[in-house]
Image: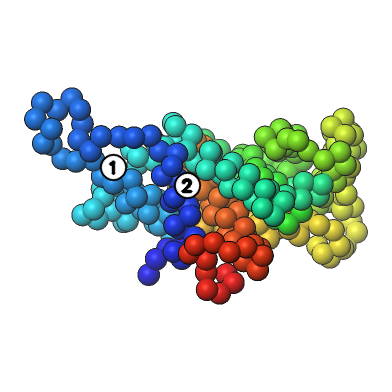
Amino acid sequence: MPVLPSWLTEPLWGQFSALLPERPHYHPDHPLHCHRPRINDRIVFDKLLQVLRFGCSYEAIADTTCSAGTIRNRRDEWIRLGIFRQLKQIALDSYDRIIGLMLDQIAIDGSITKAPGGGEVAGRSPVDRGKQGLKRSGMTDGYGIPLGRVLAGANNHDSPLLASTLDRLTDLRPLPEDITVHLDAGYDSNKTRDLLAERGLHGQIAHKGEKAPIQASQRWHVERTHAWQNAFRRLSHCYERRVAVIDAFFDLADTIITVRSLIRRSWTTHRWDNRPRRRP
C-alpha cells in the first residue's frame, strides 16, 4: 500500500527532482568507474515519505534497495542544499497564485508533542508527567495553510514564542495592510497587545476565564492544521535530535498539506494531467 496516493506523490516528486543538482551515476574519482552506483534519488525520497508518515526508524524502513545510512546521508545532503525549504516555498507560491493565501487572517497557537529521544529543542512536558516533549508555535493563514513555525522545548510558554513566530511573515511579502491575528487565552496580556501594535497588527485574543467555543473566531484553522501535522507520526512522536532535521520533516509535511489543499480546492475549477478522478 503506497504511503500517499499517486496524485499527490507524483507532483511532489516532479518538483523535488527539479531542485536536485545533477550527480554522476558513479563517483568520478574512482579510477575504473565500476564501484557501487549511486542509489536513485526517487528511492530515497519514497523512503523519507514512509519515515515521515509511519514514524518508523530508518533501520526498519531500509531494505535491499536502500540502506539506513544512505537515507540519513541523502537526507542531510538535501538539508544542506535547502531542498526541503525551497520545496515548501514553491508550494506556498503555487497555492497563492492559484487559490490565494488569506494573509489578512492569521492564526497562531502552540502544540506539544512527544520527543522520547530528547534533542536540541526538547524539554520537560507539563502535560506528559515531565517526559521529554517538543513544542511548536505554528502559524497558518485564514484557511489553515501552514506558513511557518518555531520549535522549542515543551516547557516553554506560548506567549514568548509569538514574536519569533510572527517573524516568519517576512518570507511572505507583500502583505495586506490590515492583518488580524487570532490567538487563544494563553496570549491574553498587555505584552502581547503591545507586540501586535508595534508591528501594525490587529489582535483577536480570547479572554482568560471566559468560556467560548473555538468556532467563535478563526483560531480553529490552526487547531485543524496541528491535527493534520500530527497525522505524520514522525512529528507527533519525534525521535530526531537535531533541529535542522526536525525542521526538514516539518517542511516536507507542510508541503504535503499545502499541495493536498491546492488539489482539493482547484479540483472543481481547473483541469490538468493526472487529475484525480474523484475530489480528494
Q: Residue at x 67, y 45 (%)?
A: 147
Residue 27: give x, y in percent of width and height: 21, 31
| Quarter of the figure with the C terminus | bottom right
Amino acid type of the residue that numbered disc 2 sits on in the rendered structure: Gln
Q: Residue at x 38, y 49 (%)?
A: 45
Q: Residue at x 49, y 41 (%)?
A: 84
**Residue highlighted by disc 1:** 69
Amino acid type of the residue that numbered disc 1 sits on in the rendered structure: Gly
The residue nearer to you, when weighing 245 against 18, is 18
Residue 258: give x, y in percent of width and height: 60, 54
- Seen in the image, is 70 located left or right of residue 35? right
Residue 110: give x, y in percent of width and height: 69, 48
The residue nearer to you, when weighing 243 against 18, is 18
Q: Quadrant of residue 157?
A: top right
The residue nearer to you, when weighing 244 against 84, is 84
Label placed on residue 15: 2
Residue 9: give x, y in percent of width and height: 45, 58
